[in-house]
Image (spheres, rainbow, N blue to C red):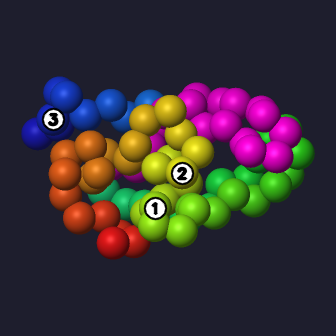
Amino acid sequence: MENPRVILESVITCPQCGHAKAETMPQDACQFFYECEGCGTVLRPKQGDCCVFCSYGSVKCPPVQMQHSCCGN
């Protein structure tokens, strides 16, 4: 059953060119790579973050939102 408090959409913003796009996050996995549609830069999580959504998204990934351990931790 899906937790109604978990937000599944996050706007990911490229730190290189500023291109932003709303993306649906996986509920039970970390996304380690994301290719920017604006400039082609491949984003990777910042040190200490588990995924690109935690580093560059407007909302942290679902496992972090639910205070569960995430893949990178």
Q: Nearer the viewer, residue 61 or 47?
A: 47
Which quarter shows the C terminus?
bottom left
Nearer the camera: disc 2 or disc 3: 2
Report x, y in % for residue 15.
74, 45
Earlier in the chain: of badge 2 and badge 3, it is 3
Q: Is residue 49 above or below residue 4?
A: below
Mark 3 or 1, nearer chain start: 3
Tag 2 residue: 55
Q: Position of residue 40 (x, y in %)?
A: 85, 51
Q: Which residue is mark 3?
A: 3
Q: Which residue is pictured at 63% across the width and 63% down the height?
A: 44
Q: Is residue 41 visible?
A: yes
Res. 23 visible in picture: no
Q: Which residues are magenta?
A: 10-27
The image position of residue 5, as x and y in percent, is 19, 28
Q: Residue at x 19, y 51 (%)?
A: 67
- The CA span between labels 2 and 1 is 6 Å
**Residue 22 location, quadrant:** top right
Query: Residue at position x 82%, y 55% from top?
Result: 41
Residue type of the residue flagged with mark 3? Asn
The residue wearing badge 1 is 49
Q: Within the image, what quadrant is residue 32 found in? A: bottom right
Q: Is residue 37 left or right of residue 46?
A: right
Position in image of residue 31 (x %, y %): 50, 59
**Residue occupying image coordinates x 26% and y 43%:** 65
The reply to whether dot 2 and dot 1 touch (C-beta < 8 Å) is yes
Classify the position of the N terminus by image quarter: top left
Task: Verify CB contact (< 8 Å) between mark 2 and mark 3.
Answer: no
Q: Is residue 59 magenta?
A: no
Left or right, residue 18 beside residue 3: right
Mark 3 residue crowding within 10 angstroms, few (<14) / some (14–19) / many (20+) = few
